[in-house]
């Protein structure tokens, strides 16, 4: 976050969320070096941390807590562990299961950022007198002339994490610090900085996958929570061509693991086109049928004033996807989005209900859509 002496006349009381990884450790160190009064905190998100990933693959393990504490000791800041396991279970894990049960594909890391790191954590921080929460996310908060704030991409697009922070509102952004977002440095340079600072996490591997699914078997995890529910796999004409043990085990665009005994007439692979939790049916078909020309996004959230009338923008539809040219217009509280070119495999639920399609401003040419539209349902129904 870019700051000037006129904007920040005094050092801030900053609560640094320390996951136990290198990014959050360097972010806390930079905040302290900038003169802020920094306190580190690690979030205990599981009543039984051994059930989360171990071996430095997750972000919620006992090892991570110890790594965060050691980093805080080196930086020279106070450190605490806060138990948010119950809140995490309700807002992230149970939401994850409910979304799959409803035929959608959730992003649990996004929900964790929204509900835990920038709702539960920030609320508690403000109640304790802190001015801001600091994290190791790669993103920027820009302060406009009128004092409003906007979330912008990080200087390094290769590491940009603004997608998973698009759920934050302006009030939350007013109390957010992202010390890594303004720097155009590679991850290797961040690791080198951590090593210069004497932080043991300098060479720690990045976290991957879903922290609360210990073995990485998402389908097995869901089956254990939801039980088996046999149903039909049908083609676009409605003909039954296979069966499954739970529609929740599929995502839009999935190709592998369909277990269809009857090959397609043209011999080409088939993909999941639709998931219907009402009748427990999974529809499959050719890759071309995955193309959509637009979507209807519910409960959009804006950093600043919502735009009026149609506009031409770019949008990001998945965490590691690129920008897509779109035209969009706010109509009766929903955002009608049309893609400049058909987009393949758009899965409902990729974003939270408040930011289903996050558009980054930038005038683009619009092109005529050639495929169907997808209604992006409201996760809260």
Image (spheres, helix red, strand yellow):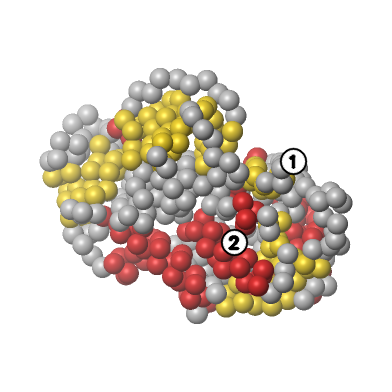
* Image quadrant in which you'd find residue 371: top left
Query: Is residue 23 at least partly visible in the picture?
Result: no
Residue 337: percent from left, percent from top: 43, 33
Q: Residue at x 73, y 76 (%)?
A: 79
Q: Secondary structure at mark 2?
A: helix
Q: Secondary structure at mark 1?
A: loop
* Image quadrant in which you'd find residue 198: bottom right
Query: Is residue 342 at least partly visible in the picture?
Result: yes
Q: Is residue 69 left or right of residue 244?
A: right
Residue 34: percent from left, percent from top: 85, 58
Residue 252: percent from left, percent from top: 34, 44
Foreground disc of the pair 2, 1: 1
Q: Residue at x 18, y 44 (%)?
A: 234
* Mark sitting on residue 145: 1
Q: Residue at x 43, y 25 (%)?
A: 341
Image quarter where the C terminus lies is bottom left
Count the marks: how many? 2
Q: Is residue 77 left or right of residue 102?
A: right
> Most extreme residue toward the left, as rendered?
239
In the picture of the structure, the residue carrying the numbered disc 2 is 118
- Whichever of callouts 2 and 1 sits on the residue coming sooner in the sequence is 2
């Amino acid at each position: 976050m870019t700051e000037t002496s006129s904007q920040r006349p005094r050092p801030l009381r900053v609560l640094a969320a320390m996951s136990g990884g290198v990014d959050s450790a360097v972010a806390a160190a930079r905040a302290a070096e900038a003169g802020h009064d920094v306190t580190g905190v690690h979030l205990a998100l599981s009543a039984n941390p051994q059930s989360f990933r171990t071996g430095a693959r997750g972000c919620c393990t006992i090892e991570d807590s110890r790594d965060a504490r050691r980093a805080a000791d080196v930086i020279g800041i106070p450190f605490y562990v806060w138990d948010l396991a119950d809140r995490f279970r309700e807002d992230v894990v149970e939401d994850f299961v409910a979304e799959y049960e409803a035929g959608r594909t959730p992003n649990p890391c996004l929900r964790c950022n929204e509900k835990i790191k920038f709702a539960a954590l920030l609320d508690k921080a403000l109640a304790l007198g802190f001015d801001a929460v600091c994290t190791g996310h790669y993103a920027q908060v820009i302060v406009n002339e009128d004092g409003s704030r906007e979330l912008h991409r990080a200087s390094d697009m290769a590491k940009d994490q603004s997608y998973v922070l698009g759920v934050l509102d302006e009030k939350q952004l007013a109390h957010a610090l992202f010390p890594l977002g303004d720097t155009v440095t590679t991850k290797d340079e961040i690791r080198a900085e951590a090593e210069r600072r004497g932080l043991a996490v300098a060479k720690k591997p990045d976290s991957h996958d879903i922290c609360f699914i210990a073995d990485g078997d998402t389908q097995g995890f869901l089956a254990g929570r939801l039980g088996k529910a046999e149903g039909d796999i049908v083609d676009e004409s409605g003909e039954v061509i296979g069966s499954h043990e739970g529609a929740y085990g599929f995502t839009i665009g999935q190709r592998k693991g369909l277990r269809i005994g009857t090959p397609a007439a043209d011999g080409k692979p088939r993909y999941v086109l639709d998931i219907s939790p009402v009748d427990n049916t999974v529809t499959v078909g050719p890759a071309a049928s995955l193309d959509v020309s637009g979507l209807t996004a519910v409960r959009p959230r804006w950093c600043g004033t919502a735009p009026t009338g149609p506009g031409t923008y770019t949008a990001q539809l998945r965490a590691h996807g690129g920008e897509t040219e779109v035209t969009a217009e706010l109509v009766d509280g929903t955002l009608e989005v049309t893609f400049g070119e058909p987009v393949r495999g758009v899965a409902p639920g990729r974003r939270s209900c408040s930011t289903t399609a996050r558009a980054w401003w930038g005038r683009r040419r619009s092109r005529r859509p050639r495929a169907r539209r997808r209604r992006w349902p409201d996760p809260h129904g």
